[in-house]
Image (cartoon, grey):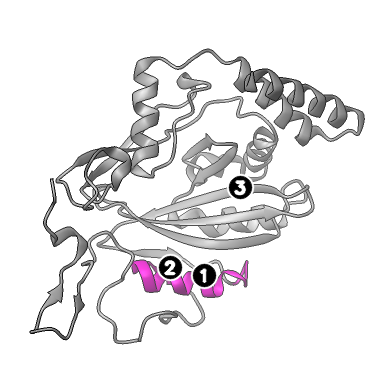
Amino acid sequence: MPEDKAKKDAVAEVETATTHGDENAAADGKNTIDRVNAPLATEDQKVSSTQIHETGAGSVSTLDPEHSSPVRMGERHGMFGSSLGSDTSGYGQLVQAIYYPGASERPYGGYFDEVADRLEEVLAEKYQQAVTRVVIDRREMTLDVPPEHLRLVAQTLRDDPGLRFEMCSGVSGVHFPDDVGRELHAVYHFTSITHGSRRVRVEVKCSDDDPHIPSIVSIYPAADWHERETYDMFGIVFTGHPGLTRILMPDDWPGHPQRKDYPLGGIPVEYKGATVPAPDERRSYT
């Protein structure tokens, strides 16, 4: 059975890691053992997991379903592809809920508790305001941070000896039109070389009406072009950036192409004035 082989491999991994004093590898091996031994998901859990994977959203772990409750982020209309049924035209008037994992509770597992403990110790009374939510999903840690506390958290992650996340490997943008008041999300990816490539993600949210988030270029210079790209594609204005201009589109380009309310467009062709309509405007062959 594949499960038996996975369990044997995980046990061997734990024994080897323990012998060499590799705590992170040992923790990963134990997580694998827990996953193999976990009970089968209930029908409700299977439905939630299926919805999440089919919409391309984040997942809700079925290993510990009470650890986090899914958060509904909106609905997806059409454009699902053939994996959800017989509709292969890309437009079958389908509607699907989008779910994302909710807040996690202690213990988080692995080094995540160490990171949270150290942040709480250094930030002291500011921690509750600076980190409003912690999500553990797919062995990844995400910290929800309000815009006004972003620079404080970023500076702490970089400079504190117990954290030392020296590298910001990217800034991503996400647009959730149904997440009223916080439609635009900026997601920062940090890595600690000092502590064996530990990773943590910081997510900051702002509204369409006030799309401003402080720039962290003065703390992480590598975020320069990443912030420019996120501004270009999503319209998030990074306050304090040394040169916030478009990086992919022309300076006079209208709108921000990766927002979900941006028109998909069509392709003009030279045949009797015909055009190929945007995917969401084509007929459905059902």
Amino acid at circle 1: His
| SS at badge 1 | helix
Question: Where's residue 98, x and y in %?
Answer: 30, 40
Between the C-alphas of marks 2 and 3, the distance is 19 Å
| SS at badge 2 | helix
Mark 3, residue position: 200
Which sits in the foreground, 262 or 160?
262
Q: Does label 2 or label 3 sit earlier along the sequence?
A: 3
Tell me where the magenta segment starts and ends, as one range. Answer: 218-238
Task: Give me the residue at 25% from left, 53% from top.
Answer: 177
| SS at badge 3 | strand
Q: Does label 1 or label 3 sit earlier along the sequence?
A: 3
Task: Give me the residue at 42% from left, 63% from top.
Answer: 213
Question: Where's residue 173, x and y in %?
Answer: 42, 60
Q: In what quadrant of the picture does the N terminus appear?
A: top right
Between the C-alphas of marks 1 and 3, the distance is 17 Å
Between the C-alphas of marks 2 and 1, the distance is 6 Å
Q: Is residue 56 left or right of residue 282?
A: right
Q: Is residue 175 visible?
A: yes
